[in-house]
């Protein structure tokens, strides 16, 4: 079980799934094959499979033990979901709760669930199936949901306007039950969880996409959700993934967050990076670049 400290905050990583996912140039359409080739040393084998030219991604939950509480950052795909628009996740069955238990976390121990945004691979384990009904998987937790996403993907926003075929299903099985139980906590702009953890809006990937900043005893990290899908976006923050609803706004948010991470020495923790999942950045002239993967 991978773990590290950010000051007084303990971070543990629970991987739900990791595999070659999509053709590299489909995942980040604005980045050509030469960029992948030129960064081969940093990308292979954890982020790119050259033989198939497929990007390698991970689905993972980060467990933070902070100020006496247990916080989950994103909850993956979940089990038994109807996802006809995504064959990889449709009716998936996995052992995520067992992996969480191996990290020493029982469902009743979780105090806070952070969904950086409302996409199916970030909210799936918000709930579990109990006798044919979806109920919160973490009975004692408050679920922090970006208000803009809750509106966009909920019934008032027409379940995302039908842009993605699974959005209605995702909301109904993974978000609505948390509202019904009274555990949903909507926020906008900025939200302080405790003395070390702060949520901030970073829209573009979705209307309410957010990042979680950790600052403790002079050490810093930023959990950036889906601002990044591949390390090739670090030197090319202007390039958004194929999943970004507003690519231009996503690029603006990405550059702002990455520039601050470099300036303040924050560890960068994206949602889908394989390998260690954590990277340090540096400047190379006016551009951003990998510094090193953090063990």
Image (cartoon, rainbow, N blue to C red):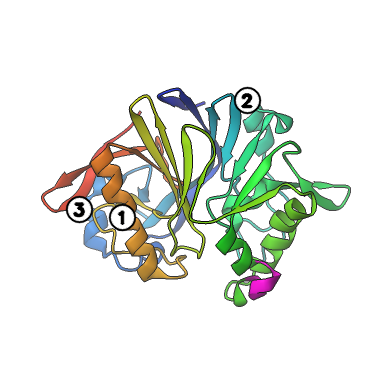
Whether 218 is drawn above or below 88: the answer is: above
Q: Residue 108: image x %, image y %?
A: 73, 31
* Distance between the alpha carbons at the discs numbered 3 and 2: 38 Å
Q: How many marks?
A: 3
* Chain-order first, disc 3 or disc 2: 3
Name which residue lies at 67% across and 42% down: 142
Q: Residue 103: image x %, image y %?
A: 59, 26
263 or 133, nearer to the observer? 263
Tell us which disc is closer to us: 1 or 2.
1
Q: Are marks 1 and 2 in contact (CB under 8 Å)?
A: no
Q: Is residue 240 in view?
A: no
216 or 11, nearer to the observer? 216
Name which residue lies at 66% across and 34% down: 111
Q: Are marks 3 and 2 in contact (CB under 8 Å)?
A: no
Whether 265 is drawn above or below 226: the answer is: above
Tell us which disc is closer to us: 3 or 2.
2
Checking the image for residue 102, the label placed there is: 2
Residue located beneath label 3 in the image: 38
* Chain-order first, disc 1 or disc 2: 2
Per the image, is 57 magenta?
Answer: no
Q: Is residue 176 left or right of residue 157?
A: right
Q: Residues within 10 Å of mark 1 (few under 14, many from 20)?
A: few
Whether 176 is drawn above or below 98: the answer is: below
Q: Is residue 250 left or right of residue 42?
A: right
Q: Which residues are magenta?
A: 154-159
Q: Is residue 107 in view?
A: yes
Q: Using the rendered view, name the quadrant where residue 264 is placed.
A: top left
Q: Residues within 10 Å of mark 2 (few under 14, many from 20)?
A: few
Q: Is residue 227 left or right of residue 135?
A: left
Q: Using the rendered view, name the quadrant where residue 281 is placed.
A: top left
Residue located beneath label 1 in the image: 256
């Amino acid at each position: 079980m991978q773990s590290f400290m950010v000051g007084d905050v303990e971070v543990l990583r629970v991987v739900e799934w990791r595999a070659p996912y999509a053709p590299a140039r489909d995942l980040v359409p604005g980045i050509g094959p030469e960029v992948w080739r030129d960064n081969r040393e940093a990308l292979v084998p954890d982020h790119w499979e050259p033989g198939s030219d497929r990007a390698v991604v991970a689905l993972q939950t980060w467990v933070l033990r902070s100020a006496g509480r247990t916080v989950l950052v994103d909850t993956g795909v979940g089990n038994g979901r109807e996802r006809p628009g995504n064959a990889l996740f449709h009716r998936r069955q996995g052992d995520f709760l067992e992996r969480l238990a191996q990290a020493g976390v029982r469902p009743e121990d979780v105090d806070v669930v952070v969904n950086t945004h409302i996409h199916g691979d970030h909210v799936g384990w918000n709930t579990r199936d109990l006798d044919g009904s979806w109920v919160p998987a973490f009975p004692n937790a408050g679920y922090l949901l970006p208000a803009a996403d809750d509106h966009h993907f909920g019934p008032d926003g027409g379940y995302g306007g039908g842009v993605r075929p699974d959005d209605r299903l995702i909301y109904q099985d993974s978000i609505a039950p948390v509202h019904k139980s009274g555990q949903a906590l909507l926020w906008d702009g900025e939200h302080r969880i405790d003395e070390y953890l702060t949520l901030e809006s970073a829209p573009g990937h979705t209307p309410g996409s957010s990042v979680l900043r950790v600052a403790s005893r002079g050490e810093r990290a930023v959990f950036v959700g889906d601002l990044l899908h591949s390390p090739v976006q670090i030197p090319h923050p202007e390039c958004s993934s194929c999943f970004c609803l507003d690519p231009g706004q996503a690029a603006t948010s990405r550059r702002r967050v990455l520039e601050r991470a470099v300036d303040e020495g924050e560890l960068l923790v994206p949602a889908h990076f394989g390998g260690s999942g954590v990277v340090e950045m540096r400047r190379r002239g006016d551009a951003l670049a990998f510094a090193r993967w953090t063990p």
